[in-house]
Image (cartoon, coloured by chain):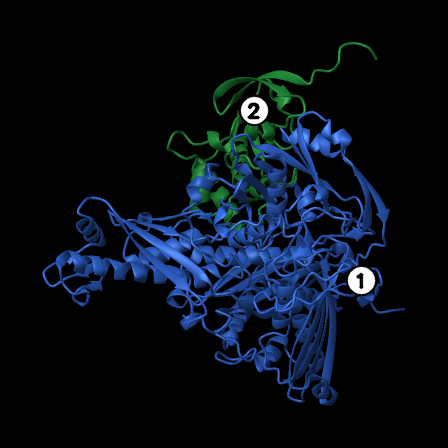
Chain colours: A green, B blue
Amino acid sequence: MTGSPAPTSIVVRMRVNGHDCEMLVPVRLTVAELLRDRLGLTGTKVSCEMQVCGACTVVVDGDPVSSCTALACDLDGTEVLTVEGLAQGRDLHPVQEAFMEANALQCGFCTPGFIMMAVALLDACRGADQDKIREWMDGNLCRCTGYAPIETAVTLAASRMGAGSRGDDH
Amino acid sequence: MTAVPRSDAWEKVTGRARYAVDMALPNMAHAAVVRSERAHARIAGIDRAEAEAAPGVIAVVTADDLGDLGRRFGHIVPDHAVLAEGKVRYYGEPVAVVVAETPHEAADAAALVWVDYDDLPALTDSAGALASDVLVHEQSYTEPGQEFLGVAPTPSADNVAHRNELAWGDAEAALATATTVVETTATFPLVYGYAMETYNALADWQPGSLHVVSTAQHPLMVRKELARMFSLPLAAVRVEVPYIGGGYGTKSYTKLEPLAAAASWASGRPVKVTTDVEAAMYTTRADGAVVTVRTGFDAGARICARDIDIRFDTGAYADNSPLVLTKSINRSFGPYRIPNLRVRGVAAYTNTTPASSYRGFGAPQGALAGELNMDMAADRLGIDPVELRRRNLLAPGDTIIDGKRPLDADLAADIDAIVDALDQHAADRDAADRDAAADAGVRRGRAVAVTASDAGASPISTAQVRMHADGSVTLLVSSTEMGQGSRTALAQIAARELGVDLEAVAVGQSDTRFTPFEWTTGASRTTTVVGLAVQAACADLWDNLRAKAADSAGIPVDDVVVHGGRLHLAAETLTPAEVIRRWFGADAGEVVGVGVIRRDGVTEMLPPFWEIGAVGVEVAVDEATGEVTVEHLVTVGDVGHAINPDLVKGQDLGAATQGLGIALWEEMIYDGEQLTNPNLIEYRVPRLRDTPRRVTSVLAERGDGAGPYGAKGAGEGALNPVPAAVAAAVGRAVGVWPTELPLTPPRVWSLLHQAEPGP
């Protein structure tokens, strides 16, 4: 093969938590590395690095994504939401409030990932029932709580946020 | 006391809570660890030239580069090489560390460090290691008179990392004359605690000082080992521990800190070392165990003797395993009246990941065989297994181990609560309209198990309360917050003792430069032992306030009476804030109280409390697949007094869920020299949809603990009996007693087919 070598860095333009940004990123950089190491958004946690634990979940264009195994260069043209972008000023997102109220955390390391997964679920499907909640939350691991309070929290948030969805068939 | 929300909840739901892995220092470099690709081999040579020439590399560090630094650490046996020297002892052992400007550059260069090995025979199971002439360690590292928590390390020889025993009466003779003798052997798997924040450490060495931020549960223990390694005074070593992303005992004692500190020393830069899950599984696991229990009963089904053999697979380095073994011995025979006892334990060095503490600390290993044995005995004796336990249980105030604190719990009442809950579930099931087809091909079993652990570790604890000029309080302790909620519960105690609102109490982060001495954060000790230190600090604060009130008023201190959160003088009543401001003559100043707990008074007798595990389970076994579903889990938190009931229930459910993981899914599998499942896909932990269909969480609050307001610890208890209870319940469902965990579908399917009548 001939031709110019593949670029080692690419310029990406994206919106992160409502702010436009444009960055030159190495092609090997993961979304989690971009968020944590370049943007200082350390709320997103990395654990299994294999899309098993869900701790690194962020929402990209409405869908939950494991940021540990997604490449930052693929974010070009997307809108990224992380746990830091949920609260409106001092007002927490209903999912965050429900996690506090249901005591749905201990060490807290899995919490941002669970919250972002729940936000994605309730955005896609406002009236999510118990089965749907269990199905979605089964993709995240928690080692402290035994899950019951987390299920309670998401159920609480679902009931408060009411029915309706953004229309996708989830 | 009342349920109050966690003080850390806002930080944690907004992503603002800081963990060690989030921390950075100016000019920080990053390290990647070169790990052994052999289980047991001599290091013939290390070629680092290519790595040193790689982009961004600052230093490549091997054992040869450590200069005057201590080469080994280990709080009981100083056997643990900071970097492998001469030989490697397990697959994944750190051989070199590469320091570079970025994590990517460090990782790339680490792959360019070439290590030549001369293979040695690998010992990957404990029985084989004890029988082998091949030695994991050719020398003993222990010194005469050395001990840790009363455990004197065994000089290593014949691959014995530690040996201990406990005996009274004459077990052998009593077994010879027993009416019935029942023997059980059970294998407890090698498990990995999987704290979701994997081990990491950031070290900043400067001449005469060392600053470390890490995931350590016991910062003061780490400080001591680093001070020794660097020949520094304790005060020159600062270990800072922000929120920990899960501990469960797996972050006890020293892990990556010496590596990070050595890398910082060698490179002259602050250096961060992290692990992925695979490297974490090469850092620490729990001791695997094979335990044999023989119990003799008299004609009335009363225990006349128990004889127990415990063999641990402790891995390549001792870490805390000598203490875990000793605790396993103490916790293996159960809270029963046993006139004759002999327990012998041996921990074997093998060429596998070093084992150490994990929630329960030897109790689950011992209880698996011990409690399964009680169920097998009940069957043999033709007695209900709960009745057999009732007949043999110790009563409150009875001696479990001579010279230790008498039993401070009512186990018969705990078991009654479990049976009531299990019966209720069965009744609800029978009452419900059910599709008979749903029960086809399903076998059910239920079991109860109970454990008592000598908990609380060493009662050495210091707390400091600083009351400010407005009456609010900063509480300083070195207990680490790993999710258990200690900052919340300790703040509740301080608020109650000082008569201030909870919002007026701030709790500082553990930092050895600023927070006072604490033995450890483990053994479920914090609420009890540190809680007592907080109470003592508050009492000291009141004394100091009284003295200052008296001094300002020019009256004898005895004329100042504290009552209802106020200081009463003959002429007036003052708030603490008024006393402070008046004494300093300004709207300023603060008064400090210090509380110290040692082996004295209420904590003179060890253990500070017995931590009870009392659980029941009902399981359903799918005959076609061997899959086990936990239909009902019952936990009893026998905690004396629940300072924060939600937190206690959270501990119980979390601990029991980890127990279910060990019972049903979790196992590190070695195939030859190498761990075959070093990832969360093949090492399966419980997920949301694996959890029990129904959970009953009971709190037993009888005020029978030595801690504040009658409290005892929680945290480990609900894990300890769960693997045994699940094994017994599956055994009852299937008709064959399991002999090893986890009870994966293939294993249970095999049991089902053993149970089928032969041709």
Q: Is residue B670 left or right of residue B360?
A: right
Residue B56 x, y percent position in the rendering = 66, 26
Identify the element where label 2 is drawn. Answer: loop
Q: Is residue A93 left or right of residue B54?
A: left
Q: Residue furthest left?
A: B571
Quarter of the N terminus of chain B within the rendering: bottom left
User: Residue B541's image quarter?
Assistant: bottom left
How far apart marks 2 and 1 lie (CA) works out to: 55 Å
Quarter of the C terminus of chain B within the rendering: bottom right
Residue located 37% across and 55% down the image? B464
Up-down relation of residue A24 to residue B560 (above or below): above
Q: Residue furthest front?
A: B68
User: Residue B731's image quarter?
Assistant: bottom right
Q: Chain of mark 2?
A: A
Identify the element where label 1 is drawn. Answer: helix
Residue A4 x, y percent position in the rendering = 76, 10
Instruction: Rate crowding at label 1 as few (under 14), some (14 to 19) or many (20 or more) other CA atoms within 10 Å.
Output: many
Q: Which is nearer the eye, B555 or A114?
A: B555
Instruction: Say if residue B447 shows up in the picture.
Output: no
Q: Which is nearer the eye, B216 or B267?
A: B267
- Three-letter amino acid code at disc 1? Ala
Q: Is residue B245 left or right of residue B542?
A: right
Instruction: Report the disc number at residue A61.
Output: 2
Task: Give the residue at mark 1.
Answer: B129
- Three-letter amino acid code at disc 2? Asp
